[in-house]
Image (spheres, helix red, strand yellow):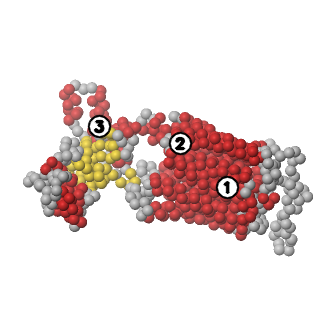
Amino acid sequence: MGLPKLNIKYLPIKLHYFLYWGGTASIWPFIPVFAKQMGLSEMAVGLIFTVAPMAGLIAKPFFGAMADRFKRKKKLFLFFILLNLMSYLCVAFLPQNKLERPVELECNNGVSYITQCERLSPHCEETILDSFKPVEVRERHKKLQDGYNRSERAIIENDEYLEVCTGTCEFQNFREGVDFCTKVQNRNVPPLCYPVIGLSQQLETPRSDSIKYAPAERQVPSNSPNKSNLLQQEDELAEHDNTEHLFEFKVKLKIDEVLLLNGCLYLPIGDIDFEQGYRGLSCFEKTMLRKCEIDCGNNTNLNRHLETIKSEEELLDSMNFWLYGSLVVIAWIAMGVTESLSDALCFQTLGDQSQLYGKQRLWGTVGWGTFSFISGYFIDTYSEGKLLKDYTPCFYLTAGLLTLDICIAYKWDIREVEKPKSLRRDVCGLLSNLRIDVFIVACVIVGMCTGLLWQFLFWYVETLAEKHSSSCDHRNWVKLLEGLIQAVQCFGGELPFFFLSGWIIKKLGHVHCMTLVLGAFGVRFIIYSFITNPWTILPVELFQGLTYGIFYANMVSYANQVSPPGTAATVQGIVQAAFVGIGVAVGSLVGGLIFQGANAFRVFGVGCLIFCVLHALAMAILGRHASYPFPQGRGEAEGQEMCRMSTNSVQEDYVNTPEEKKTKTMFVYNFPQNNVQYGNF
């Protein structure tokens, strides 16, 4: 038994899907986290990825209609692949924000601290704190735990280990400077306080002869009749304050006494040097400088845990926000139009062999699974030991694959079909069919579930990993788990079901397949909601074959089947806009509003099962009236087998020479002699 023969006619289709989705997978999954490195907030990214599908909602049917109306499918197809490539490459040149280690300087009467809050997880307290301490400190603690006599313990405990770091602090306004300089004790006042003190001497504030400022209890009380006047004078002085608000310091931290309480890291200060020698730091009462940065160059673990990417403070005034947002919207539009046009051209090339669509489309899954894994490996390899990931290899890979795809698409032999006499009338007539409308609504529901899955599955996985792990060791394997999840989705789920999609759709029919997809999504999400061990998600990802592989093949096959002659690209754009433009966008938005781990998946799962039952009932009721014809005679009557042209039909023949006569297509359908059977189309 030999290998099956390769049909050369279909080779460009396979190569296009493999190269296009491989090139897209090389960078698109990392586009949201790339925004984080640019300093964009979660709100900014969420806003962009809500607007982008809405833009795709308009673009897909619009450009599909243009392609059908002017018979320019291939030219538009090539243009949008090129536009996709250019938008990805432009993202590579966007500026990325620098790293920072934002901390606060807390001055207290007793022990002062360098603090940082909401950066570290309390769940990993012991692991994080141990990672800060050098080997000799950890050994010292081990000796203390093992037990020594009293004299040995005293020697060990008195041998403090101090970590030397450098830092800067800034007075955000004049009033903050006055507050800090007033409360710090005179034995170690920062030099920056001297001009602040000079400016503030114009205020009617009692001062101490020793430090020029009185402690808090000697300051003007809040109920003083002169308080408002003093504050007004202070504001006026601040307007004329030309002194610099930034000062540098060196600090010795008691690294072995570091604390992590309620998500806040406390690094006790041993000594601090404000350009006048190391001294202690103490204040009459607690005060803080909230805008500081620190660098502990000799302690890479501490630096790494303190590091963060500087976020944009003003969203709408940020150039990065507008540049990144514009490119993402352009890329989304280009990707959506390319997807709908490529499916229309695929069915056009397949002709009466439309059941082979899944065997062509599976090569897109192969490309996605292969190159998303390769890209992830390259990113980790090139970014080892860095907080900022290096995505350069991904952009090179994307550029190479999409350039090859343009060459393949250019050589793809595509013959345009006759344009419709009235595109608007044909499409409006199509959308007036109730069963087609119910099918489109089902696509929206599946899109909502897909949006929740795309945006929040990995978020949920990392939450489960943190809860399941007894320490922070989940950080060493959670990315591996996420990579395996994508591998199972692609190769264990989508690949076999794309291959079998033609046979499954033929056996069950499009309507029953849609009901199966809705039920599978409901079961999948409910299983998610009861999982406690993140590794048990892997077998659940086999549902991807039903919830995406069968669904996508079923959706585009149905759109191709019901579209009147010459409207394939338009109808593909409509159903895919319903799926992505409405469904994914709404699912992402609603998921973001209600996402609290398992509960969100449980709510979506129950809702999906309810709609599965409603969909089956609605289609069963509508199926009793089997006389609904498809518009313009391209599809069969609803509920009947797929149309086939008889041997005596005249096939449309587009000739290569102007001398040959073009004959108008005549469709003659062979319907089964038995009565209509619901679901067999």
Residue under pointer 2? 600
Residue under pointer 1? 575
Q: Is residue 398 left or right of residue 345?
A: left
The reply to whether discs 3 and 1 touch (Cβ–Cβ < 8 Å) is: no
Q: CA distance from mark 2 to mark 1?
A: 26 Å
Residue 338: x and y in percent read 64, 60
Q: CA distance from mark 3 to mark 2?
A: 45 Å
Task: Please tell me whether mark 3 sits on a helix, a strand or a loop.
Answer: helix
Q: Which residue is at the front of the view, 657 or 347?
A: 347
The extreme left residue here reads 209
Residue under pointer 3? 137
The reply to whether discs 3 and 2 touch (Cβ–Cβ < 8 Å) is: no
**Label 1 crowd (10 A; few <14 / some 14-19 / many >=20):** many
Q: Quadrant of the N terminus?
A: top right
Q: CA distance from mark 3 to mark 1?
A: 63 Å
The extreme right residue here reads 648
Q: Nearer the viewer, mark 3 or mark 1?
A: 1
Residue 63: x and y in percent read 65, 65
